[in-house]
Image (cartoon, rainbow, N blue to C red):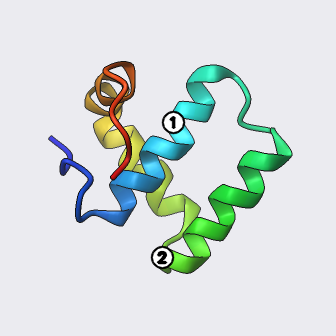
């Protein structure tokens, strides 16, 4: 089960990315600017976030559907 998000930057980035995937707007330019800027600031890669989503997708989707924030 993933961290609650309060201390895990990969969790927060995964929630951000997956929420856009679930809305079908992953190619939105605004998302790309915010998402990749966030990754750069946190020092993590998109491939790490993608792997995290693949491992924890079900619980991440539940977190998003409950309307919880990433942090």
Image x and y of residue 43, in percent: 50, 80
Q: Which residue is drawn at 48% across and 73% down?
A: 44
- On screen, residue 13 above or below 25: below
Which image quarter holds the N terminus?
top left
Instruction: Indicate the quadrant where residue 27 lies.
Output: top right
Mark 2 Cα-neighbour bin, 10 Å: few <14, some 14–19, many ≥20: few
| Mark 2 vs 1, N-terminal side | 1
Mark count: 2
User: Which residue is farthest right?
Assistant: 29
Image x and y of residue 37, in percent: 66, 69
Image x and y of residue 22, in percent: 56, 23
53 lies left or right of 29? left
Distance of label 2 from label 1 (alpha carbons): 17 Å
15 lies left or right of 60? right
Q: Which mark is residue 18?
A: 1
61 lies left or right of 21? left
Front residue of 67/54: it is 67
Mark 1 Cα-neighbour bin, 10 Å: few <14, some 14–19, many ≥20: many
Which element is circle 2 on? Answer: helix
* Mark 2 touches mark 1? (CB < 8 Å): no
Q: Which residue is drawn at 51% across and 45% down?
A: 16
Q: Residue at x 38, y 47 (%)?
A: 70
Which element is circle 1 on? Answer: helix
- On screen, residue 16 above or below 44: above
- On screen, residue 47 above or below 56: below
Image x and y of residue 31, in percent: 72, 47
Q: Which mark is residue 3?
A: none
Q: Which residue is drawn at 71% across and 36% down?
A: 26
Q: Which mark is residue 42?
A: 2
Instruction: Indicate the quadrant where residue 64 lies.
Output: top left
33 lies left or right of 14? right
């Amino acid at each position: 089960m993933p961290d609650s998000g309060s201390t895990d930057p990969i969790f927060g980035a995964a929630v951000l990315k997956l929420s856009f995937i679930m809305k079908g707007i992953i190619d939105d330019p605004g998302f790309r600017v915010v998402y990749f800027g966030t990754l750069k600031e946190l020092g993590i890669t998109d491939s790490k976030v993608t792997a995290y989503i693949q491992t924890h997708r079900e619980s991440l989707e539940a977190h998003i559907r409950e309307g919880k924030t990433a942090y």
